[in-house]
């Protein structure tokens, strides 16, 4: 997809006729609706300078009554390796295991790298089409890619810097020791642009939970990075890996709040009591979970984790690549899926589900008090064709405009 917006304003300017949520409507102490009103918003130096009473007669940019929401954030995606932008391909039934996929990647990566800058930009444009201005993206670090995948991804992000930003995870997709990726991981960890040390299935791929996790943890500590590992393993090895990482976070406070397990499918196979217990441990170690919200056979205990204060991040993961073809690129669609899966059907519950698309930022708190936007907040917003957050989640509303770092882009 080509960039779907055009630059409308940057620097210092104002918007009028901006619809903001102001509170909940109640009937017998039950939320039955969301109150909104129109406001004027001043933007200055990439921040929201002020939120004022609407001035429809001013010469400000007309937001046309669209609903202003926090810009969306995709917290698990692979921008560096995608078929998006190439002719359609479905998955092959021949490749069923992670090791099958590694062998396939080793074949195709050299050719894919030739055009990965353009395809990463097209995938970013798709995310922006659905209102995202930020992503946490994993990039391959392996003997086949070397550092080229990172270099191409950084070029794509540089080309999109006025409208999009990302934090980067060095991802040893082919194993740390299954292929000779450890030296490359050490090299990547030295780079300022890399924020997280990644990993994947240490037991099934590398044959040792402790060896791989100790390497990952030490690399993160040595270079002041976070950790975000892929964990598809279920059963004993999956739970042992999660608990091992929690123990390391508890032992090393520097890792708390910036250590994550992506996917963590093992959690979907627990009893309710076990889910409560591991959620308590995750919260104690300040270890978060990043999920693409699977729903085929594995329903993640997201409500239980949220109840215990676990930081649950949501992302698309794959958008038409050789691992999966079902990613839409829409974070509102992910919030909608969560609402359907867990029965968040009321006005209040739907409004709370927006947090999974914005990564916890909500216009109203649980009591209906307006908490966003405020003067000094980052000028990262979307204008949605919706009357309120609940409708935006339920109907996956169209995004009419996107603002990143104060730069306003209106749909073509």
Image: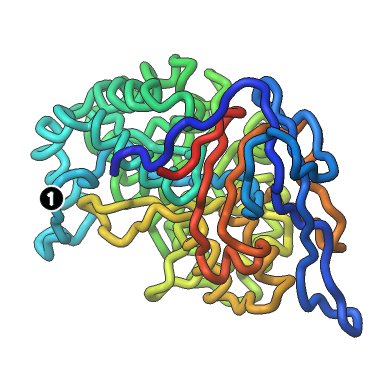
| Residue found at x 65% / y 25% | 46
Question: Which quarter of the figure has residue 263?
Answer: bottom left
Relative to 36, residue 73 above or below: above
From the image, which quarter does the N terminus lie in? Answer: top left
Expressed as whole percent of the image width and height from the top left, the position of residue 383 reads: 59, 49
Seen in the picture, residue 169 relative to 266 is either above or below; the reply is above
**Side (left or right) of 116 relative to 304:** left
Q: Secondary structure at mark 1?
A: loop
Which residue is depicted at the point 29% across and 47% down?
205
In depth, the one of 353 and 211 nearer the eye is: 353
Quadrant of the image containing the C terminus: top left
Q: Judge left or right: residue 156 versus residue 288.
A: left
Residue visible at 79% across and 42% down? 55
The residue that disc 1 covers is 87
Please name the colour scheme applied to the rendered image: rainbow
- Residue most extreme to the bottom: 28
Q: Which quadrant would residue 122 be assigned to in this image?
A: top left
> Could you tell me how many numbered marks the image carries?
1
In the displayed structure, 34 sits above or below 191; it is below
* Residue 161 image offset from top left, x and y in percent: 45, 24
Residue in the image at 21% along x and 57% along y? 97
Q: Report whether 43 appears left or right of 74.
A: right
Image location (x, y in percent) of residue 251: 67, 36
Question: Is 110 left or right of 8, judged from the image as shown?
Answer: left
On the image, the x and y values in percent for residue 331 come to 49, 55
């Amino acid at each position: 997809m080509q960039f779907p917006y055009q630059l409308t304003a940057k620097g210092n300017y104002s918007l009028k006729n901006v619809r903001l949520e102001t509170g909940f409507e109640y009937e017998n102490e039950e939320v039955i609706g969301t109150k909104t009103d129109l406001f004027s918003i001043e933007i200055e130096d990439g921040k929201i300078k002020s939120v004022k009473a609407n001035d429809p007669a001013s010469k400000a940019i007309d937001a046309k009554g669209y609903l202003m929401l926090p810009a969306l954030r995709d917290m698990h995606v692979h921008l560096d390796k995608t078929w998006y932008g190439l002719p359609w391909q479905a998955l092959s039934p021949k490749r069923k295991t992670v090791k099958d996929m590694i062998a396939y990647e080793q074949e195709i990566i050299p050719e894919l790298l030739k055009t990965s800058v353009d395809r990463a930009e097209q995938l970013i444009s798709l995310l922006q089409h659905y209102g995202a201005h930020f992503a946490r993206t994993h990039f391959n670090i392996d003997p086949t890619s070397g550092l080229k995948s990172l270099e191409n991804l950084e070029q794509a992000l540089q080309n999109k810097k006025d409208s999009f930003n990302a934090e980067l995870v060095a991802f040893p997709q082919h194993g740390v020791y299954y292929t000779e990726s450890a030296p490359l991981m050490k090299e990547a960890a030295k780079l300022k642009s890399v924020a997280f040390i990644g990993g994947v299935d240490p037991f099934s791929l590398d044959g040792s939970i402790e060896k791989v996790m100790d390497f990952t943890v030490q690399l993160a500590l040595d270079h002041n990075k976070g950790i975000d590992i892929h964990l598809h393993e279920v059963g004993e090895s999956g739970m042992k890996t999660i608990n091992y990482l929690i123990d390391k976070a508890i032992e090393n406070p520097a890792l708390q709040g910036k250590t994550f397990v992506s996917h963590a499918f093992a959690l979907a196979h627990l009893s309710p009591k076990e889910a409560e217990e591991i959620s308590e441990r995750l919260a104690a170690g300040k270890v978060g979970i990043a999920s693409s919200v699977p729903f085929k056979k594995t329903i993640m205990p997201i409500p239980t984790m949220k109840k215990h204060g676990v930081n649950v991040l949501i992302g698309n993961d794959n958008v038409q690549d050789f691992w999966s073809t079902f990613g839409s690129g829409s974070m509102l669609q992910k919030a909608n899926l969560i609402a359907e899966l867990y029965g968040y059907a009321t006005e209040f519950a739907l409004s709370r589900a927006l947090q999974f698309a914005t990564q916890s930022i909500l216009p109203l708190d649980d009591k209906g008090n307006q908490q966003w936007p405020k003067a000094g907040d980052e000028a990262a917003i979307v204008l949605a064709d919706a009357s309120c957050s609940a409708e935006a989640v339920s109907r996956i509303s169209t995004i009419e405009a996107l603002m990143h770092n104060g730069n306003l882009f209106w749909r073509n």
